[in-house]
Amino acid sequence: MLDHSSESATISFSYAHQGVRGAHSATACSSSQWIIDSGATDHMTGSATGFASYSSLSGRDKVSIVDGSLSLIAGKGFIPCSSLTLTLVLHAPKFTRNLLSISHLINSMNCSVTFFPPCVFFRT
């Protein structure tokens, strides 16, 4: 479910909304950094803080983490940011990073993504 090599990366992103270029740090969502992951199928975080809406799950579903172990998915919800809302974010308590799923973002925002060496642009 995850691109295991991505957890060692550190990156922020720029978000272009309706053709207007604007830079917004991914850290605006919380006090920690979010890693843009092209291999993740879902947004994921290890922290229960920052959710504006949260639903506890049964704990039967699990996700693989970078060390090969499994973490239970404790819940899911949405996390508001300064210019967008991350929807269906999975809370996996053993996770040590926050992952932004590229595929989830482009599908939920109906946008395209362009990668450049210093940044990433999302365009609607």
Image (cartoon, helix red, strand yellow):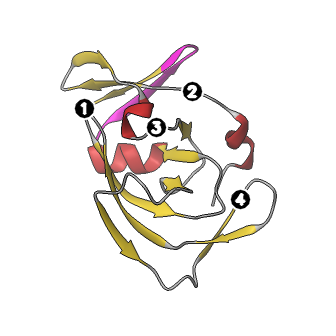
Identify the secondary structure beneath mark 3. loop
User: What's drawn in magenta, residue-wise?
Assistant: 110-119
Mark 3 lies on residue: 31
- Mark 2 crowd level (few <14, some 14–19, many ≥20, 10 Å Cα): some
Disc 1 residue type (three-letter): Thr
Of callouts 2 and 3, which one flags the residue occurring earlier in the amino acid sequence?
Answer: 2
Of callouts 1 and 4, which one flags the residue occurring earlier in the amino acid sequence?
Answer: 4
Mark 2 lies on residue: 11
Disc 3 residue type (three-letter): Ser
- Mark 4 crowd level (few <14, some 14–19, many ≥20, 10 Å Cα): some
Mark 4 lies on residue: 65
Mark 1 lies on residue: 124
Q: CA distance from mark 3 to mark 1?
A: 27 Å
Taking depth in this image into account, of 108 and 84 the one nearest to the observer is: 84
Q: CA distance from mark 1 to mark 4?
A: 31 Å
User: Residue 21 location in percent, x, y?
Assistant: 27, 15
Q: Are marks 2 and 1 in contact (CB under 8 Å)?
A: no
**Labels 2, 3: front one:** 3
24 displayed left or right of 92: left
Residue found at x 55% / y 13%: 118
**Labels 2, 1: front one:** 2
Q: Are marks 3 and 1 in contact (CB under 8 Å)?
A: no
Of callouts 3 and 1, which one flags the residue occurring earlier in the amino acid sequence?
Answer: 3
**Labels 3, 1: front one:** 3
Query: Which quadrant: the N terminus?
Result: bottom right
User: Residue 36 location in percent, x, y?
Assistant: 53, 37
99 displayed left or right of 85: right
- Residue 50's place in the image compared with 12, above or below, is below
Q: CA distance from mark 4 to mark 3?
A: 22 Å
Of callouts 2 and 1, which one flags the residue occurring earlier in the amino acid sequence?
Answer: 2
User: Residue 42 location in percent, x, y?
Assistant: 49, 57
Q: CA distance from mark 2 to mark 1?
A: 21 Å
